[in-house]
Amino acid sequence: MSQTTLPTVAPERADGPSIGETTDLLVTDRRTRTPGSVLRRVLIAVWLPIVLLVLWWFLSASSTSPFFPPLSRILEEWWNQWVIGDAKFQLASSLRNLLFGYVGGAAIGLVFGTLLWRFPPMRRVSNPIVYFLYVLPAPALLPAMIALFGIGELRQIALISFGAIWPTLLNTLDGMRGIDQVKFDTARAMKLSPPRVLFSLVLPGAGPQIAAGLRASLQTSIILMVVTEMVAAKEGIGYFILQAQTVFAVTTMWTGILTLAIIGTVANYLFVLIERFVLRWYYRSRALGNS
């Protein structure tokens, strides 16, 4: 096979900081999961965020800046807006667009990444096109998306999907091309059918890198969700933040930013938990290798 020059999103490193390392403190082997060990791991995972919040609370308590209100005022306004107020209805539109856009883009990336691996001539021909679209900033397509799809939700979903395609596609392709050729020779000797090779060998072997691409696509989708809601939109978290800034409701604006941060954090942790369930065999083998 000839080598291509497609850039890829690097998979999660075992020695690098990531949200997965924090989740390692919460997801452990059942043989070591005792109440004391779970509590200790939870405390290790959350102590620094708690300390930072406490510092923010006290350091901002006497703030008189209209742009950086005290945290106590932000939390009070957040409760009034997002818990007992009407702002929580902005979440439905944002999360719906995020879900459809992310799932659609990731599915396209996975399918086309597999096709490019399976058919090298197709990969060589499409390499310049894929590279061109990969480096194209998705927000720059907003005017074109408005012209094509109008100002409704379809435009937002389409742009989110476009941005979610490339990290998954490139990591799928790179992960599949990195599988040892000896495994294919063994599968050929065992006379396994192509579908059996794909689902029993290729996808599991490339699974860790595909997961890294899916996580990168999730981050891109969250960013594009906000961007699309700040332009020609009438609802959503991005619209809420921009409208609050327009009328100089700075505290309300900060509640939208806080809500967005909570959504991103929860989405990432859910992704990691699902990833570690699906790839539990991989993390067990990595744990045995590090022991």
Image: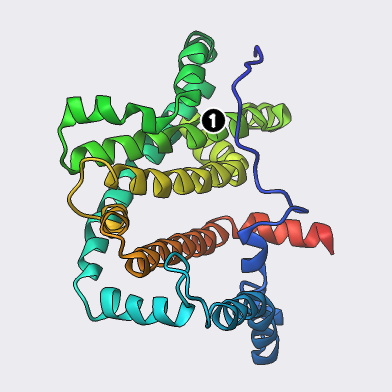
Badge 1 local density, few (<14 within 10 Å), some, or many (20+)? Answer: many
Taking 206 as reference, is 244 left or right?
left
Residue at figure coordinates x 61%, y 46% from the top left: 208
Helix, strand or loop status at disc 1: helix
Quadrant including the C terminus: bottom right
Along the viewing direction, whichever of 255 and 114 lies nearer the viewer: 255
Along the viewing direction, whichever of 209 and 101 lies nearer the viewer: 101
Q: Is residue 237 above or below residue 129?
A: below
Amino acid of disc 1? Leu
Q: Position of residue 216 (x, y in %)?
A: 52, 44
Q: Residue furthest front?
A: 64
Image side of residue 112 versus residue 8, left or right: left
Q: What colour scheme has been applied to the protein in the rendered image? A: rainbow
- Which quadrant holds residue 210? top right
Q: Position of residue 26 (x, y in %)?
A: 62, 74
Q: Residue at x 54, y 23 (%)?
A: 117
Q: Which residue is mark 1?
A: 170
Vertical arrangement, residue 256 with respect to residue 169, above or below? below
Name of the residue lying farthest toward the bottom: 36
